[in-house]
Image (cartoon, rainbow, N blue to C red):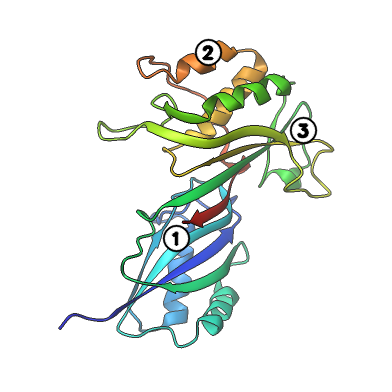
Amino acid sequence: MKQQRYYYLIKIQYLGYRLHGWQRQPGLKTVEGLVKKTLKFVLGELHFKVLGSSRTDAMVSAHESAFELFIDHEPLENMADFLVLFNQNLPPDIRALSIKEVDAAFNIIQHPKKKEYLYLFSFGRKSHPFAAPLMATFPENLDVDLMMQGAHIFEGKHSFHNYCTKPTPHTVVEREIDTCEILLNTKITASFFPDKSYLLKVTGTGFLRNQIRLIMGAMVQLGRGEFSIADIERSLAPDVKMPMNYIAPGSGLILNKVDFE
């Protein structure tokens, strides 16, 4: 007899500064590891599995991420009560935002979704230490107007073979970016942030390993004068081998939201 399985979509947020990304790794603190440890306590003897929507890197934060919870045999009696208990036992840098039941046809990996990433940064002067978990600071002066111009080049469908870490022969490197722009940061603020900071906003359906951080790295190199606009355009040509070698620090990157269509 086939056992009954129940499916739940849970949205969470977390500060990634002390964590080694989403995926569970032996001997390291990860979001998945801490979530599963908390679920074992909250769910007791119930058998469960989790599957995340995004594998964020070490030190990367999420304003809104998601994972799917699979529970065998018995459903949650009260989802609202579960959410309260789950939050009470999660560490302070992880918070569950919502929970809803989905059906067996829902697949958090394959289901169509849009992701929005933000990369917060400042430059020219060292920031307050309290800003370090959320913002990268580049010591040199950057031509931010040129960076704003260059960011839009990534919009549309391109080959991102130069913006991926360790692709395999099966990696699909052609991806489509809906929005890529550098803006004055007014979205995430704090009293200890610099008077002026910026953000790179990137939206799309799916991204390659380190793609956003490599794009940000290329923008920093553009702002330093190491690249030209023509270099950025050339890097997206399918037949040009120009691997990006500067990965911007993980602490500036935030998965801002995940919308399931």
Can you give x and y, in whole percent of width and height, for residue 165 in the image? 40, 32
Front in this rendered view, residue 142 or 102: 102
Q: Are marks 3 and 1 in contact (CB under 8 Å)?
A: no
Q: Is 145 on the left-hand or right-hand side of 86? A: right
Q: Callout 2: few (<14), some (14-19), or many (20+) C-alpha neighbours within 10 Å?
A: some
Give the distance between the C-alpha atoms of the residues marked 2 and 3, in whole angstroms: 29 Å
Residue type at tag 2? Asp
Q: Is residue 165 visible?
A: no
Front in this rendered view, residue 171 or 20: 171
Q: Find disc 2 in the rendering and name its residue.
A: 231
Disc nearest the viewer among 2 and 3: 2
What is the residue that sits farthest to the bottom in this orientation? 77
Can you give x and y, in whole percent of width and height, for residue 211 in the image? 47, 34
Q: Find disc 1 in the rendering and name its residue.
A: 32
Q: Residue, x 53% and y 34% (percent of image)?
A: 213
Q: Find disc 3 in the rendering and name its residue.
A: 126
Give the distance between the C-alpha atoms of the residues marked 1 and 2, in whole angstroms: 38 Å
Indicate the secondary structure of the residue bearing disc 1.
Answer: helix
- Which comes before the other along the chain, label 1 or label 2? 1
Residue 142 — which label? none
Residue type at tag 1? Glu
Q: Is 80 on the left-hand or right-hand side of 260? A: right
Disc nearest the viewer among 1 and 2: 2
Q: Callout 1: few (<14), some (14-19), or many (20+) C-alpha neighbours within 10 Å?
A: many
Front in this rendered view, residue 153 or 214: 153
Can you give x and y, in whole percent of width and height, for residue 108 in the image? 39, 59
Indicate the secondary structure of the residue bearing disc 2.
Answer: helix
Q: Residue, x 81% and y 46% (percent of image)?
A: 192
